[in-house]
Image (spheres, rainbow, N blue to C red):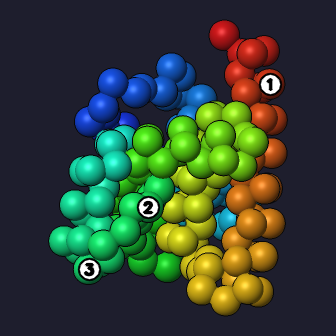
Amino acid sequence: MQVAVEFIYETSFSISDERLYVCWLTSCANKFKATSIDLAIAFMDDDALHTLNVKHLNHDTLTDIITFDDSVGTDIVANVAISIDRVFSNAQKFSQTTENELIRVISHGLLHCLGFNDKTEIEKERMKEAEDVCIELFHVERKRSHYVS
């Protein structure tokens, strides 16, 4: 599988092990039958993501993620913008670790590219189940990475 993942930091936040996240995203993509991945994931603050939300989606609300999906079939191509402020706030609100909330949000963006939606209650349930699979894959990948040098 061809994999290209770029992390863009527009805040002081950064991922400590980008390689782990790339391996994990590859595992998720394989699990859900993607054939390639080309992602740019930008981490920003609430204000920056709110500006994108108003400008591109005409939504005057705060959100944790916006996915600009240019995927074709099972070839995943997307620009993903994540509010790190929302990730931290939602982690606290939902009694999650920041890491689990972050991987849930990234999973959510990837799953949208794979055809998952979250408009109806049934779609939301299906999305949550798929997010849970991705979260589990992250922890499996992390364990694996501890044994590989």
Q: CA distance from mark 2 to mark 1?
A: 31 Å
Q: Which quadrant holds the C terminus? A: top right
Q: Secondary structure at mark 1?
A: helix
State the residue lying farthest toward the front: 93
Depicted 88 relative to depicted 53: above or below: above
| Figure quadrant of residue 7 | top left
Q: Secondary structure at mark 3?
A: loop
Residue under circle 2? 63
Depicted 26 relative to depicted 57: above or below: above
Residue under circle 3? 58
Mark 2 against mark 1, which lies toward the viewer? 2
Residue under circle 1? 143
Mark 1 against mark 3, which lies toward the viewer? 3
C-beta proximity under 8 Å, tags 2 and 3:
no
The residue lying toward the viewer, choosing from 77 and 104, is 104
Residue 64 place in picture, x, y as percent? 47, 56
Q: Earlier in the sequence, mark 1 or mark 3?
A: 3
**Residue 97 visible in this rendered orientation of the protein:** yes
Residue 55 place in picture, x, y as percent? 19, 71
| Figure quadrant of residue 81 | bottom left
Query: The residue under label 2 is which amino acid type?
Result: Thr
